[in-house]
Amino acid sequence: SKLQLKTGDLDPRLFSRLRHLQKLDLSDNLLDKFPNSLTLPDLRVLNCNNNKLEDVTALKQFPLLEELTYENNVYLTLNDDYKVMFLLQNLRLLNGKDITKLANHVRRVNSRKLTSKARCVTAHWEKFFRDQLPEKYTAEQVKSIKKKFLKSVQTNVVYGPSSLSEFTRWRVKMIAEELLACSLGLELNTDPEPEEKMDENEEESAESPREAAEEVGKVGDFSNYINNVTVTPSKRKRNHSKPGSGNKRSKSQSNTEEEAEDVSAEPLHFLQCHSKGNSREDFKTQLWSCVFEPLLDCGARKDPIVSSSRTVATCGGESVCLIDCETGTVLKKYKVATEEFFSVAWTTLTMVISDSRKKSHNILAAAGRRGIVKLIHVAADFCYGEIKAHKKPIATVCFSPIRETHLFTASYDKRIALWDIGIPDCDYNFKASQLLVLEALSIPLRIALVPTCPDQYLLAGCEGGCFAWNIKLDKEQKSRPFEAVFQFPDEDGGMTTSHRVDGLAFLNDDVIVSKSSKPGCIYLWSWSRSFDSKGKGCQRTISAIILAELEWSTTDLSYLTLSTCPAKDYVFCGDEKGSVWMYNLSNCTTAWSSPKGKRSDRRIPPTQILKWPELRENGEQLTEVLINNVVSDPTFTYLVVLTSVNITAIWKKS
């Protein structure tokens, strides 16, 4: 240990002679992998803490290994834990924890389920690849077919939670190789392929300093399921036209509407994972923000198993949680005792560590009452830095979709700041700089970048109206007033700019959905038709070109925000009774895209309302549930509902 050893320093000619070595300490070195031929047939205890390991499969050469530690190898994940439990049949302790029961589950139960997928693997081969192999084949043909088949089968044979997708893909590949080598009589190992390497420009993993380790923790027993849950969801669908009403629709319109109305979502999990002090009695912590983790793009390769991420980050009270929506497992929990988190946002950074190698990693930004942005490298369980962005609370944050290091923070100081958070080096040193300050007349509550020009215009829903700023960085002016304020119909039939806008999101490249404090008022309006970028002057007053109005609750309560699912043309908004209002607007968006698209004369009712189920804790029913936020994943498979009573509800579209 502590010799600055690299992988090349482990000479197999030396180690293969140590046939009776039982304990080996390689901690605090620079190893990025193990050579495959160290042998060490009697090794029982191995310590690899504080290295740069990226892969664990070479550990299978130590079949008698009983104790293994590899903490602080920041790019080893839960998937690697499962791999070593599967490969090392005698392993009892992993990173100091007894994993006997879990390892047995991985080797038997999980393997039985995966082995049952062998039929799918075989069927995939027979259907798509068997006929591609000629009767008389060359080694090159076999190699080519194998490569295509293994890539395809890992994409199409899906099993298990997204958090274990790498492990599952690894096992599916193993099953597929066994099928080709044994059942089909193809000996594929005569010309073994090298292990898949990262792109030349991918990074080495980094050893992480642990200065803030007390703030980071993997979650064990923090997540409480609500006890004695009785779930009785009810649904209300859009009314069909009555027979003989004279309403005529084309066949395509009719089919689309019927499909739109055939929506069903079932409750999966109700989690109490943001409790103050992990108390089961906490039904007061407000939950505010949630966002699904983006699919990790390593170079040109995206995770082929999962079409959409199942992992969502949620925040409220003193903690931020990462939850697997399918299983309801709280994967990680980050906690700051003196904070109240209001907003979270994801970005993917391509981090360069050493040897000019690069690798993409998801970074989570979390902010709230203290005005500080926390930057969390999730895979490493490490909060590597913070930005003291504002002296007052931060209401919301969002990253630019085209500049991964650009972060917008909207604060109670009536300012929206644009930051370049930089990219951390191997020691997690980073430099953040402020690029812009947008001056608002009131507190900004929600912000959204215009999809067609995200580097030029930003919209904000504020306590005193809806505003737009020019954010182009080629201008010298660092502090900028708003460029336009939008006016909307008021209750008296006139137009007003003065109203609280507590919900704001784009439904597509042009259509904006905004919610005002006027009871029951959600407007859909056109950005391109409302905002004339060629207009002269600053702080212009512009009438929003309204396309439609959505029927919603008559409550005058504020801060019950909305969200959209652009891929499915859906809008979601919760209410003061625990219900979720869902609107499928696919019938309308085509008409609105026309330059002469007319406003819908009637208020559009919800496609469906998900009623809050009956939840009881200690025999008492939870009442007065406000839905603070509702967010779906990009494909609208899961719906995450955040409440005022410290409950995260997860629904699944069935």
Image (tube, rainbow, N blue to C red):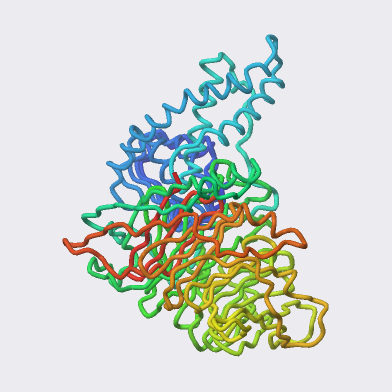
Q: Looking at the image, which residue is at 40% across and 77% down?
A: 340
Q: Could you tell me residue 111's position as x and y percent? A: 39, 32
Seen in the image, is 180 located left or right of residue 404?
Answer: left
Left or right relative to 153: residue 577? left
Pick whichever, 409 or 585, lies toward us.
Answer: 585
Residue 547 rendering spot, x and y as whole percentages: 65, 66
Q: Is residue 42 left or right of residue 394?
A: left
Q: Which residue is at a point 43% across and 68% down the rendered structure image?
A: 315
Question: Image quadrant for the N terminus?
Answer: bottom left
Q: Which part of the image, by quadrant, shows the C terminus?
A: top left
Q: Position of residue 147 (x, y in %)?
A: 65, 29
In terms of image quadrants, where is residue 177?
top right
Q: Residue at x 55, y 78 (%)?
A: 501
Task: Check the image and name the residue furthest to the top.
Answer: 135
Residue at image coords 71%, 81%:
542
Outermost residue, left direction? Answer: 619
